[in-house]
Amino acid sequence: MQLEVLTRDSEEETREAEPELEVEQAPSPPDLSKARSFLTDLRPSGFGELLVTDAWLPPEPKPLAKEEPPVDRQRAWKQRQEWRELNLLRERPAVSYDARTEDYWGQVSAALARCPEAIVDAYTHLVAGFADAGHDRMAEYSRDAREYGREGDALLNLGRAQLAIGRLKSARNVIKAAAKAEPSHARVWYHLGVAGLFARANAEASDAFRRALDQMPGDLRTEAGLGVARYHERKYAEAEEHFRRTAGSGGLRAACRSMLACSMRMQQKWDEARVELGFLRNSGSERWATVAQQCLDCVERGEQRYAAPFVSRRKTREAVKSVATAGGGAVAFVYVILENVLKQVTKGQKGWVIAGALVALGLLVRLVGRSGRRGQSEPVGNYEQGLPCWQTTTWMRPRRSEF
């Protein structure tokens, strides 16, 4: 009996001596009711691309010293641009949703409902519109498509379901069949336009949205979709026309006003862009006001770069620099070869050799000029994390595939 008591006491002492292992708790999910923005991009995935929607929270405020001067926004943007070009930015969204699962569309729609004040780009609005796609009823839609008089709606529902499960190519073919069965079905043409945007078939998307707009003039989503498609085609004047009809102060209309100002900026309509951004800044949304200020900074940089007094001097300076650095050695090399060749050819052939050398030199100068222009980067880019810049999205600048 005494032995049992001693054993029990020693076990209790051992348990007391052993430190308790702390169980790591999973991090709590972020509060998306405070989200700053929801932005959707196409990202490389395998041999294709994948829709990804990022939810961004506001950046943590940085304490400022009392004697510290106010922030120079243009200088801060330039430093951020340098970090971006060097791939030193390590900002991560609070949550990312992607289209690898059929729940993606519903997840995006539910997240938007939690924060109606957030900045939401036009692409995210398009994604949320597929939250009700019945991907679990595909067999039913296939049966209905074989019944006379129901082909259009059934094929449209089948195409939406296929798009929701990632079969983008099949979805486009099915929706095209629906458009062939019912050419006057406006919703069919609208969804064909959306599928075209998701597949980067921008010309096809523009045509589909235009046909949808013929059937239901003034529809907000269709007009916005056509504006986005024209913007992707870099037809900024036509994009401006459609965004002007849809611009407003909230929701999809606020995104359209922002893209309207960007379309004007890309056409070097500096004052008109400032007017639209002034409307956006005074729309009553603090978040969209931040976007408007960022875009006003971008307009200022663009005007300084492309204004008439600076353009000719800048182009001349860059051309001379490019020819001097990249073409100087090549010109000397061509001269040495030409000198040796001229010693070996007859008098009648020298003219042809000199003409060919001049043509080659002209092509060289043109090539150097093109390379210099390609090296120039547009003064665009977001000022802070989570703020959209329409010119820097993967919709306009696709990323290289993983393969």
Image: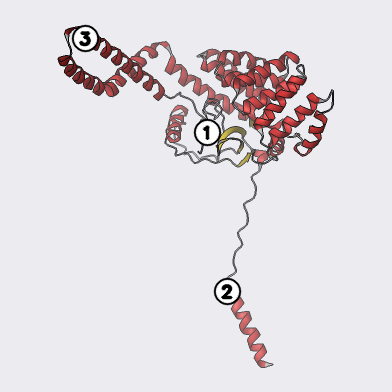
Give residue 18's mark: 2
Q: Earlier in the sequence, mark 2 or mark 3?
A: 2
Q: Which amino acid does label 1 sit on?
A: Glu
Q: Residue at x 54, y 18 (%)?
A: 234
Say which mark, if any, is on residue 349: 3
Query: What type is the residue that disc 2 sits on?
Result: Glu
Q: From the top left corner, tell me how far across and down residue 81 is, in percent.
A: 45, 31
Distance CA(mark 3)–CA(mark 1): 64 Å
- Regarding residue 373, the answer to whether it shows in the image is yes
* In this view, 78 is above or below 368: below
Callout 3, which amino acid? Gln
User: Which element type, helix, strand or loop, lies under badge 3?
Assistant: helix
Q: In this view, does 3 lie to the left or right of 180?
A: left
The 10 Å Cα crowd at callout 3, few under 14, some 14 to 19, many 20 or more, is: few
Of the image marks 3 and 1, the number of the one nearer the N terminus:
3
- Residue occupying image coordinates x 56% and y 15%: 235
Frontmost of labels 3 and 1 is 3
Q: Is residue 93 left or right of residue 167?
A: left
Q: Position of residue 58 (x, y in %)?
A: 58, 37
Q: In which quarter of the view is residue 349 placed?
A: top left
Marks 2 and 3, how far apart in space? 97 Å
> Looking at the image, is 197 positioned above or below residue 61?
above
Q: Would you name the residue on which mark 1 appears? A: 384
